[in-house]
Image (tube, rainbow, N blue to C red):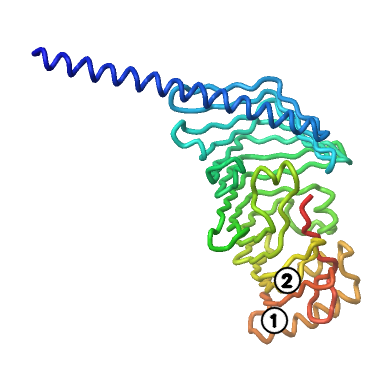
Amino acid sequence: MGRKGGKAMRFLLSLAVLAALAWSGYWALAARGIERGLAGWLDARRAEGWAADAGRISVTGFPARFDTRLAPLDLADPATGLAWSLPWFGFSAHSHRPQRVTVRWPETQRIATPTERIEVTAEAMTGALAFRPGLALELVSAQLSIGAFGLVSDAGWRASMDGAEIETAALDERPGAQRLRLSASGMRPPEKLVATLDPAGLLPPVFQQVAIEAVAVFDAPWDRHAVEDRRPQLRQVEIGRLDAQWGDLALQAAGRFDVDAEGQPSGSLTLRATNWREMIALARGSGRLSAPLADRLEEALGLLAGLSGRPGMLDVPLRLALGQVWLGPVPLGPAPNLRLR
């Protein structure tokens, strides 16, 4: 190799060393910034009256990643009475794409409300989040994957499911709108709830599956302020598809409704129910419908189903208004309050 070739090699080697030093400096500064940012966030929450403690904050993964771990982590919001305790909580991002984050939860967690404590177990619980660049950390999309999942309350109930997948994506053409997809399988609700819904024990204790596709419009973006200040509130929901299966009962729904400032929905839904007579029997047995009202509904809906030529399947429109769910002029019960605490 000639003298010129040697100079070229030394020049390239010098550039490589400088690039490595620059990248090392960037990584170290960014890692330190993450640690300080998290510590500052916890300090700010404590200043607002929260209980907010992380035993240790660490950032590893040099040179390609920022792997952040808080162990343990305890948060409690006095305004809502909610508390969350984890042995550890972790998230990571590629060094060159810090706005895309992978989140990991431990196998055990604890959630406390003003009335009970709930032990949460999950075989695998991971998420992938994408944020818009900036300090607000506005959520662009999220995917959450949950394996076998269980809840055990000190109030005496337990529930579980085999797994779930949840996806959200912001719709840029509609401010505040999020496209939602959810699928869950093998759901085992609390025994007391099942006994209330099905006192005769006609159905299995497991809901086979639920799938939902919808668009939800909120009054504010989901960003760091949703945790620090107030939760974004629903203003409109469009259900494109809802499928649920419990034993031989099948339910499909689609529709659209608005949500007022008090969390009350108003709008309409179209339901398709298979084996709908069993659903009325469940509502009668649980006390949600009185016997006379259940008889009148079964007679009227039987006429509608007979006109369609499919007596076991029923298409029926429902209205949400005045805090109630209505079938024509007949109130079926209170509508759910959708205010987020």
The residue type indicated by label 2 comes to Trp
Image check: 138 left or right of 194?
A: left
* Image height of 159 relative to 96, above or below: below
Count residues near mark 2 (Cα–Cα under 10 Å), then give few for <14, some for 14-19, many for 20+. many
Helix, strand, or loop for circle 2?
helix
Image check: 299 left or right of 108?
A: right
Q: Nearer the viewer, residue 50 or 200?
A: 50
Helix, strand, or loop for circle 1?
helix
Residue 283, numbered label: none
The residue to which callout 2 is attached is 276
- In the rendered image, residue 136, in percent from the top left (x then y), is placed at 62, 43
Residue at 61% across, 62% down? 215
Residue at 61% across, 47% down? 164
The residue to which callout 1 is attached is 305
Q: Nearer the viewer, residue 190 or 112?
A: 112
* Image height of 22 relative to 111, above or below: above
Q: Can the viewer see residue 84? A: yes
Cα distance in 3D space between marks 2 and 1: 10 Å
**Position of the N terminus by quadrant:** top left
Lower sequence index among marks 2 and 1: 2
